[in-house]
Image (cartoon, rainbow, N blue to C red):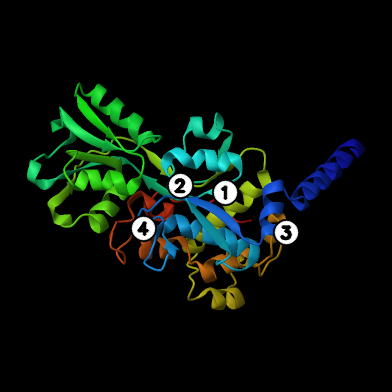
Amino acid sequence: MHFLKSAAAAAVLVVAASAAHAGPTLDAVKARGKVICGVSTGVSGFSAPDSQGKWSGIDVDVCRSIAAALFGDAAKFEVVALTPVQRFTALQSGEIDVLTRNTTLSLQRDTALGLNAVAVNFYDGQGFMVPAKLGVKSAKELNGATVCVQPGTTTELNLADYFRANKLTFKPVVIEKQDEVVGAYVSGRCDVFTTDRSQLASVRATQTPKPEEHILLPEVISKEPLGPMVRHGDDQWMDVVRWSLFAMIEGEEYGITSANVDQMASSSTDPNVKRILGATPGMGKALGVDEKWAYNIIKQVGNYGESFERNVGKGSALKLDRGPNEQWNKGGLLYAWPIR
């Protein structure tokens, strides 16, 4: 019994010590005073600059949430625009602190690249967009088509697998930069553009002269769980990134919004809400941040539903349905670990 008590006490000390010790990335970010996030070169709704150079989108909101958790200020961030080919090298080399770019989480990326998949912030799947004038109704009618695709993506592999499995041939038009591959499709250089369906919807709504002249085919040929990634070997930094995203998801589940967060912080009797917003302390200490970390995220960035709505939902140009990105208790896949 004495041995068990001693072992338990030692375990508590180890946990406390590890919680108090910041890893190299977290130390560097705090010393710099801002977080540097890798984003796409421009996908409306996910990460794109406006005419004044201000970046917005679901992926940018993840970056903002990390800044809010660390500094109490969602504006203390910087983005680095990266192509699919550049993104992993930029993270591995330390050019960026976290990759919040629309990136599929997969086994190879989570292991062989020396990176960690953090959590899913958007569930997607690969599809195909074609000009309506082609008269094509199914991807299985694309035999012999020229297909625009970006290199260094899961999209490129999925495309080859799908055509091979269905005994179809195609001619790839491989272009690295997002705006250039879209330009090739719009100009008619290729018959088909393939990528994640959310990105196709974004391109159709914001980058084609007449969106009604382009259709998304019904086939969804892959699972594309998109989410942030960090480097291996820096667990506390991964914790901060993961729980910053989870705070947005938990905020929506418990009905905490940017508009009512102050009221809920002062008057809610729900023990879950009190832990999330720091009225019951302990969660911030475990992460190595202020106890109001989640309050600051929801107050300044909003919960996940607010971010979805303004960036890609019915309040945006994309007008996407929630689909699998609905909360788990409303028929979707969105599920954060409990903040407790």
Marks 1/2 in contact by CB < 8 Å: the verdict is yes
**Image quadrant assignment for residue 133:** top left
Query: Looking at numbered disc 3 in the image, what kind of residue is underneath it?
Result: Lys
Q: Is residue 333 visible?
A: no
Marks 4/1 in contact by CB < 8 Å: the verdict is no
- Is 135 left, or right, of 235 in this rendering? left
Name the residue beneath numbered marker 3: 285
Q: Earlier in the sequence, mark 3 or mark 4?
A: 4
Q: Earlier in the sequence, mark 1 or mark 2?
A: 2
Marks 2/4 in contact by CB < 8 Å: the verdict is no
Q: Earlier in the sequence, mark 2 or mark 4?
A: 4
- Is 260 left, or right, of 142 in this rendering? right
Cα separation, mark 1 vs mark 2, equals 10 Å
Q: Nearer the viewer, mark 3 or mark 1?
A: 1
Disc 3: CA contacts within 10 A as few (<14), some (14-19) or many (>=20):
few
Q: Give SS at disc 4.
A: loop
Name the residue beneath numbered marker 2: 82
Residue at 45% in and 60% down = 304
Name the residue beneath numbered marker 4: 45
